[in-house]
Amino acid sequence: MKKTRVVKINIFFVLSLVFVFCSIIFKLIYINVSDKVDGIDIDEFASNRNTKKETVVAPRGTIYSSDGEVLAKDVNSYTVIAYLSESRTTDINNPHHVIDKEMTAKKLSPLINMKKGSILKLLNMDVYQVELGPGGRGITELVKDKIEELDLPGIGFLSDTKRYYPNSDFASYTLGYARKDEDNIFNGEMGVELYFNDELTGKNGYVEYQQDRDGYQITSLPSIYEDSVRGNDIHLTIDTNVQMFVEQALSTLEKDKPEWATISVVNAKSGEILGTAATPSFNNNTLEIKSYYDPLVSYTYEPGSTMKIFSFMAAMENGIYDGEAEFKSGTLKVDDATIKDWNKYGWGKITYDEGFMGSSNVAASKLALELGRAKLKDFYNSLGFGEATGITLPNESKGIVNFKYNTEVAAASYGQGMTVSAIQMIKALTVLANDGEMINPYIVSKVIDSEGNIVKEYGAKSLGKKVSSETVSKMIKLMRGVVDGSASMSTGTDYYVKGYDLIGKTGTAEIASSSGGYLENTYVRSFAGLFPGKDPEYIIYVASSKAKSSNKIKTVVKSLVKDISTYYNIDLNDDGDKDNFVLDSYISKNIDFIKDELDKSLDVIVLGSGDRILSQYPSSGSTVNIGDKVFLRTNNSDYVMPNISGWSKSDVSVLCNMIGISVSFEGYGYVSEYSIKSGSKITVSDVLSVKLEKKFKEEEKKE
């Protein structure tokens, strides 16, 4: 008989199984109903495992000139990559690595501005791939296209965005620069780029999507987007044409090898800075910077005799000035010091008016001492010396106006022993153009958001009337005498331009030594001028430190007066001979007849071979100067390319607009090269490429 086997179940084993099972069930319930488990947010944990969030970087705002030219913008840029590993090539007839290194280096050299040997050294490295830097970094779309046309095996590109300054070394200190940080965000580090960094920086967006375990987006699931918002645009008061005149003037000034120099042209009525440049300058794209401080606002210096404009005005305002009264020039004993005129011996007994025109230190000192320390200092302070102007540029310096002893009072009257900035001098000079009212200079006109709304707006800001109309009239008369030679000792006659009513004052200041006293035969030379003197509209201020001579200052001031007068159609001719006239309407008239008439005084550009005029530029009623270009488009569209060598950018733009073709510019200044050959036919599909370069217009100077 078979025996039955009985299995006994241990009660503790059963209870253990039940406990484990219940624990698992409880844990699952807990996980499902709880927000956090062991301190971990379950929803967030699950989401992060499957959700990808990418930042959409906002474009930086653009900086524009007052005439709408782009001065700084974001552009696509590229880095040239050379693939060197043979493993990239599977078909020898279609290579994907660099085959002929010698040929590749030779062809790339002129396009990326690197020597052939430097490129070849990189191509001979034992690596998979290499960047061809520095020349191949941050290249433009145009350069990339040229490289691609070479069809070089193994040459590729990495794309990026860079901050681009189309005119290179142009208003460099004003614009400054911006470059990317470790988060790939642009940050301004100089100039307007720094001062308005928050406004120029946009708001980043993002895209959020679900991804599979391999990291690919799951297209069947929706994505979440938040668009980026581009930064605000900054509009400057800078006029590109005036800036071009100033840049050319600076290039001329640099021939005297100054340690630093600054030139500005300002609308004297409104305070708008129309053009300003400084040396040592730099290319905003390549950033070979010698100084990070703008001489317009950051440098302070002893101004020298241009300060006599204001010390003489202080005497006038306080009723102690008699221009016909005489004094003995040459030397003046003040306490334990002897004040000397710049020529050491003076001119004998002369009037105070002659003293100003001859830039007598003795005349200025005698007036200042009679006026007294407190009143002279108060007058200087009322014109803003010793305090920042508040201009929207970084690193503005205040200067020092602090004199106590008689010798210091005397020295301050002719601009020694005190320091100013160029922007302070410009600010104070505005009183001469506004009947004694002072206007604060400014360089940014408005800030506009991505929707086209004006966020901030700047304009002429009156700082109140500082001097009387009588004082203004008297000072204008004296400054005219400095230039036109009303006195035999006038110091500014080299600035005189026949037919132009320029008023001004020269300055030559010794430079303080770090060890005490002053450096020998080393000066800051300057000129403060306004024109036309009968009702000043423009200020020209030039200062140059440690230059070999002052000859180039004279050259550039006269050139600027002529260029600006022509550009703004200002009739400054005081000889009665008109050098401008008003255009009539020539529409529908015979081209031959009109051309014969206008050729006598204007540069007539005829477009097409028709016999009747369909359009003209400038339009009827416009004032033009003798020698200006007038464009006449005829009723036949077989256009022929004229010789545009030496033309201005604006003239080329007019030409292209009238015949309906596209144009692109490189550089600034005047036409040096262009892509459509002179005399060849033009079609509407043509694109004219123009290279602009500086053109100097130096005059004969007095030595």
Image: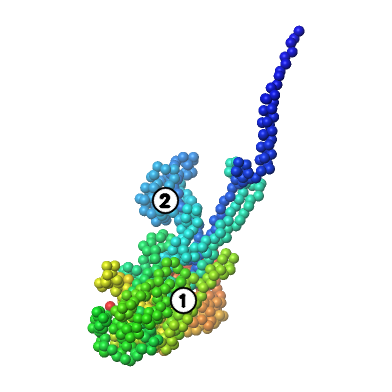
Q: Please state if 315 lies on the left or on the right of 661 as rendered.
A: left
Question: Residue 515 at x, y = what percent?
Answer: 27, 67
Nearest to the observer: residue 4 or residue 605:
4
Number of marks drawn: 2
Q: Where on the picture, by quarter, is residue 177?
A: bottom left
Colouring method of the image: rainbow
Tell me the residue that label 2 is attached to.
132
> Which residue: 58% across, 56% down?
205
Task: Nearest to the eye among marks 2 and 1: give it.
Answer: 1
**What's the residue at 45%, 49% (across, down)?**
81
Residues under numbered marks 2 and 1 in contact, where contact means CB atoms less than 8 Å apart: no
Crowding around mark 1 (Cα neighbors within 10 Å: few <14, some 14 to 19, many 20+) is many
Viewer can see residue 187: yes
Q: Label 2's element?
A: loop
Instruction: Report which quarter residue 480 is drawn in.
Output: bottom left
Instruction: Using the numbered discs, state the Cα–Cα distance from disc 2 to disc 1 in whole angstroms.
Output: 49 Å
Farthest residue, direction front: 12
Q: Quadrant of the C terminus?
A: bottom left
Q: 181 left or right of 366?
A: right
Residue to which mark 1 is pinned:
440
Task: From this view, report whether residue 577 is shown above or below residue 8.
Answer: below
Residue type at mark 2 is Leu
Q: Secondary structure at mark 1?
A: strand
User: Is residue 485 in view?
Assistant: no
